[in-house]
Amino acid sequence: MSKLKAKDPLAPARGPMASPRFIVALVLIGLGIAWIAYYYIAFDPTAVPPSEDGKPKFMGDLGDWNYLIGFGLVLIGLVISAHPSTPLGRGRGVVVGMLGCFLIGLLWICTYYIFSNDLSSIPVFDDLGQKNLFVGIGFMAVGFTFATRWE
């Protein structure tokens, strides 16, 4: 008789650590963060040091749409990282991604409500205004994409 091997619950899930999908997800998340940071620094009149014109010109013309582009890239990158071929899409990574997105969304909304009377001291929050709710709910929605992968 053969002995059944007991599965070790703490053993890491098998699979490549850096799949092409995971690299694309990381690049999208990095681009989204960089897009928001560059727009906020280059086009904010209170930024230190203040820029003369803000270049490239098309970013200035987009206005608040830059935040949609930046946060959209971040959220799409997180959704892509929920695939089972990535470390966040299998095993304990699913729980980390799910709880992380839920908590970031909750903290984003709570921070907005707590400081909603004077958002001028919080970068990005002050430009978004009521749209902060969309950002928080967006992170929570991405958390549900991780929840669908939970076994």
Image (cartoon, helix red, strand yellow):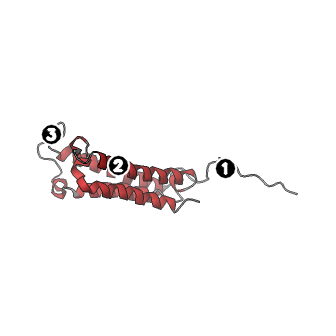
Give me the C-alpha separation between circle 2 and circle 3.
Answer: 30 Å
x, y percent for residue 48: 18, 37
- Residue behind mark 1: 9
Is disc 2 surrounded by few (<14), some (14 to 19) or many (20+) residues within 10 Å? some
Pointer 2 with pointer 1, Cβ within 8 A: no
Q: Residues within 10 Å of mark 3 (few under 14, many from 20)?
A: few
The answer to whether residue 100 is left or right of residue 119 is right
Of labels 1 and 3, the one closer to you: 1
All told, the count of numbered labels is 3
Task: Report the front residue among 32 and 134.
Answer: 134
Dot 2 or dot 1: first in sequence order is: 1
Q: Residue furthest left?
A: 52
Query: Is residue 2 or residue 142 the one in the foreground?
Result: 142
Residue at image position (17%, 47%) is 43
Residue highlighted by disc 2: 110
Horizontal side, residue 106 vs residue 127: left or right? right
The type of residue carrying mark 2 is: Cys
- The quarter of the picture where the C terminus appears is bottom right
Q: Is residue 69 left or right of residue 14?
A: left
- Residue depth check, mark 2 versus mark 3: number of the one nearer the observer: 2
Q: CA distance from mark 1 to mark 3?
A: 54 Å
Helix, strand or loop at mark 3: loop
Say which residue label 3 marks.
50
Tell me if label 1 and label 3 are in contact, CB under 8 Å. no
